Image (spheres, rainbow, N blue to C red):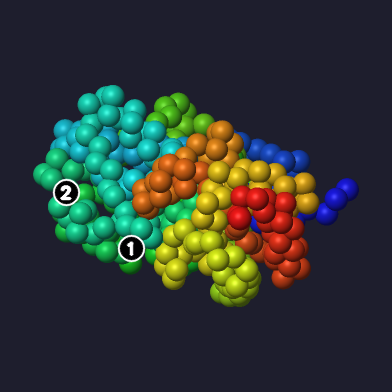
Amino acid sequence: MQQRIYLDNAATTCIDKRVLETMMPYFSDFYGNPSSLHTLGAQAKEILDQSRLNIANCIGAEPDEIIFTSGGTEANNFAVKGIAFANRYKGNHIIVSAIEHDCILNSCKWLEEQGFFITNLPVDNFGLVDIETLKRVINPRTILVSVMYANNEIGTIEPVEEIGKICRQHNIYFHSDACQSFGKVPIDVNQANIDLLTINSHKIYGPKGVGALYIRKGTNITPLLHGGGQEAGYRSSTENIPGIAGFAKAAELCMLEMATEMQKVTKLRNILTDFLFSNYENVYINGHAEKRLPGHLSFSFHGMEGETIRLLFLLDEMGIAVSAGSACSSNHGGNASHVLQAIGLSPFEARGAIRVSFGRFTTKKDIDALTNALNSTVMQLNSIFS
Ligand SMILES: Cc1ncc(COP(=O)(O)O)c(C=O)c1O
């Protein structure tokens, strides 16, 4: 089999073998239902409690503030719809950034049909939310502000602490989607005044289909799922114990290895950036130069934006996996990215980003292979460049 080079870690990551090892006994030996009173149930409950504590410790939360979900999408839906419905007597206005993930934006579209008013907060050319605009659009009926911690397409890290402070001053809930930043940069929900935080497992070398919503104690939120009352009544359904154990192990490993890993991926990203700028006059970077995720690079070639999907396929044929703006946009007919348009690119340009996301297992050899492959694919697409 051809050796594949995986540079799409923002879409998902492989499972770290140490995570897989942690999960295995919970499929076969300790398979009890944590709500059962017998020994097998108690064993499952023990790992559930331990995992909750581990995840809470990663973000400065208390264990009973962590609600496990089926992933980032569910946690984001829960945060936005749960706050909206629980607090509609107080107000019906919600503010979200224009570059949120579709699961936030589409939840908001649906809420609009239910009578809520949504303000899309613009961002500047680097993808940073404008704080002054935020202050201006808050009104007495605003109940929630949702701004992602870091963007999945362009890697820009948002000024969450400032946003949190403003929300706290106005007594408005602040939710942040940290699916891209959890495990990659330090997060402290208290320091950032975050009331709700979405995290997931499959971006940090854990299993797919598991995530969590941090809900600050005292937050007024309505559950999405009603049933047997698991997860303190916030999220009914038997907990995914192997997934949760894996998620907690993955998170623990990230905390232990974050500093060295981030140093490594930053170095690799800089090598690729230097290569791009020294070889192509028409290259430009999408997102912020410094306020960005360490292992994330989004770039485009002026005039060649329409050829990006072809370029991705050529690289794929050479065994190299990179992405267009996001996994979602790559998979939906190369739609012009709402994120790239929000930072000021035209609809044509907004089809043309190439996202390279480095990870725990990325090596210098992988980057060499990518730069060599870019050289030859660019030759193939030469007519477009000239
Ligand atoms: C920023 C962001 N939010 C939410 C999600 C959705 O998470 P999940 O795939 O766990 O549902 C993703 C994953 O693509 C993401 O990047």
Quadrant housing residue 328: top right
In the rendered image, residue 142, in percent from the top left (x then y), is placed at 18, 43
Residue 159 — which label? 1
Q: Would you place residue 324 above or below residue 168 in this image?
A: above
Inspect this view and state whether residue 85 appears: yes
Q: Would you place residue 126 above or below residue 45 in this image?
A: below
Quadrant housing residue 360: bottom right
Quadrant where the image shows the C terminus? bottom right
Q: Is tag 1's residue or tag 2's residue first in the polypeptide sequence?
A: 2
Element type where label 1 sits in the image: loop
User: What residue type is disc 1 on?
Assistant: Pro
- Residue visible at 36% across and 51% down in the picture: 344
User: What residue type is disc 2 on?
Assistant: Ile
Tell me if the residue at label 2 has its CB under 8 Å from ligand 1.
Answer: no
- Residue visible at 17% across and 55% down in the picture: 135
Which residue is nearer to you in this view: 227 or 156? Answer: 156
**Residue sitting at the far top:** 113
Element type where label 2 sits in the image: loop
- Residue visible at 38% across and 60% down in the picture: 126
Which residue is nearer to you in this view: 344 or 298? Answer: 344
Quadrant housing residue 95: top left
- Characterize the local packing of mark 1: few (<14), some (14-19) or many (20 or more) Cα atoms within 10 angstroms: some
- Residue visible at 37% across and 53% down in the picture: 343
**Residue sitting at the far right:** 1
Residue, disc 2 = 138
- Distance CA(mark 1)–CA(mark 2): 17 Å
Residue 260 — which label? none
Q: Would you place residue 359 above or below residue 245 in this image?
A: below
